[in-house]
Every structure is written in structure tokens, then in C-alpha cells.
Image: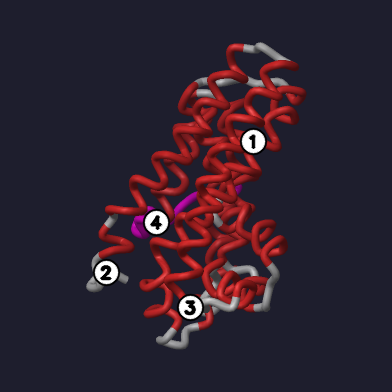
Amino acid sequence: MSLDDGIIYNEKLMRLARGDEQPDRSIPVEYMMYDIWESMRAHDKDLADEVLEPAFVFMRAQVDKQRLKPMDLQTYFEYREQDVGKAFLSAIMRFSMGLHMTSEELELARPVEENCSKSISVVNDICSYEKEVRIAARGHEGGALCSSVPIMQLIANVDVPGAKRILWQMCREWEVRHRQLVDDVTRKNQSPALAAYLEGLEYQMAGNEAWSLITPRYNDVTVG
């Protein structure tokens, strides 16, 4: 699928998610998208609505032509925060946990979220690199290689294994940074909802790494 085709496809799904259109019940992806969001709104409309826009940002990033352009590491992190769906993951987590947070609490958590996003993005890049190379070799526009691994190769003038080792060490440093950032936030605000949210971000980082290391999606050469 080309990026332009992906844009059209995603816009259709977004209209269904908002409830602006009725689904074609003969097309599973349409009624699944519609029914999931309707059921979420029925459970907790406020939290479900908070998930909606982050989901759309994630979907749009998947077909953004920015991914085809050369990027430095900082630009890449900014793009990947949308592409990896970090805001979507966090909004889904708040929905699942029933966490109704104030705008002040969410703003305080923002640096922790950004740090978490870098970790999730880079761990995914390291573990999925060989799969992404195989997909990119097929020449489809939507499968263009977009990864921190070749960016680090260029920055450090090292091979792929060397770039991965550097990136793994960066991930370990982001774990240390997470603790520092959480301490900073909790000194300013002791809200139970905020504390639960920050702990959830830590579980996201740890869970993503555990999953990335064992999932057949990245490790089985017959997948993808």
C-alpha cells in the first residue's frame, strides 16, 4: 500500500471511530473499528474521547511522508513519538486504569512520557531492525526503512552491531533518567492518579522490552 492509499484508508477508519459514519457490516475492519469505539464510549465517554485524537495522530504518522526523509536523531525522536503511538498508548492506559487526570497532572507527566517514548522507540528499532530491512528491500513506499539504527551508524561511524550496542546503552540511561524525572514530579504533586500513571509508564518501558525480545513479529524470519 502506498502512503497516499494509506491516508485514504485511515481517514475512513477515523470517521468510523468518531461515529460519523455507519460501518459496512460485511467488512470486518469497518464494524470492528466502529464497535470498539462505541463500546469504549459507553463504558467511559470522557476517557474514551481522550484516546481518540492520540489514536488519529498515531494513524496519520504511519503514512506521513516525513518517514521517507533523512532525519537527525532529535528529529527522529520527535517523529517517532507519534509513529510509535506513545500518546495513544498512554491514553489507552489511562482508559484501562480508569485514571481521570487533570491537565496540570498531565503536563507534569510530560517529560516522563517523552523519556518513555524514546526508550520504547529505540528498543523497537533494535529488535525489529532485521525485519525492517527485509521489508524495505521489497521496495514498497510504506515499507521504507525508518529506524534509529542507521542514524546511529552514521553518527558514530560504526556497523549495525555497534550501533545497536550504543542504542542499548542509551536505553539503560533512559531507565535511570525515568527514576530522576519521577522523583522530580512527585516532589511537586502527590496525586494518587499521577503516581499510578507514572508507574504505568515504567511498566510500559519494561513490558515493551520484554515483548520486543521474544515476539515472533521481530524474531521469526517467516513473519512479515
Q: Mark 2 or 3, which is nearer the eye?
A: 3
> CA separation, marks 4 and 2?
21 Å
Mark closer to the chain start, 1 or 4 = 4
Provide the residue span drawn in magenta.
20-29
Labels 1, 4: front one: 1
**Residue at the spot of label 4:** 29
Q: Residue at x 32, y 53 (%)?
A: 213
Which comes before the other along the chain, label 2 or label 3? 3
Magenta-colored segment: predominant secondary structure: loop
**CA distance for labels 2 and 1:** 33 Å
Amino acid, disc 3:
Asp
Position in image of residue 140 (x %, y %): 47, 84
Residue wearing tag 1: 112
Compared across the picture, whether 33 is left or right of 131 comes to: right
- Up-down relation of residue 7 to residue 214 (above or below): below
Please determine whether, in this image, residue 43 is positioned above or below residue 85. above
**Mark 3 or mark 1, earlier in chain:** 1
Residue in the foreground of this view, choosing between 154 and 197: 154
Which residue is more in the foreground, 12 or 217? 217
Identity, as a three-letter code, of the amino acid under mark 1: Val
Q: Which residue is mark 2?
A: 223
Does the magenta-highlighted stretch encompass residue 144?
A: no
Q: Is residue 217 visible?
A: yes
Does residue 196 lie above or below 124 as drawn? above
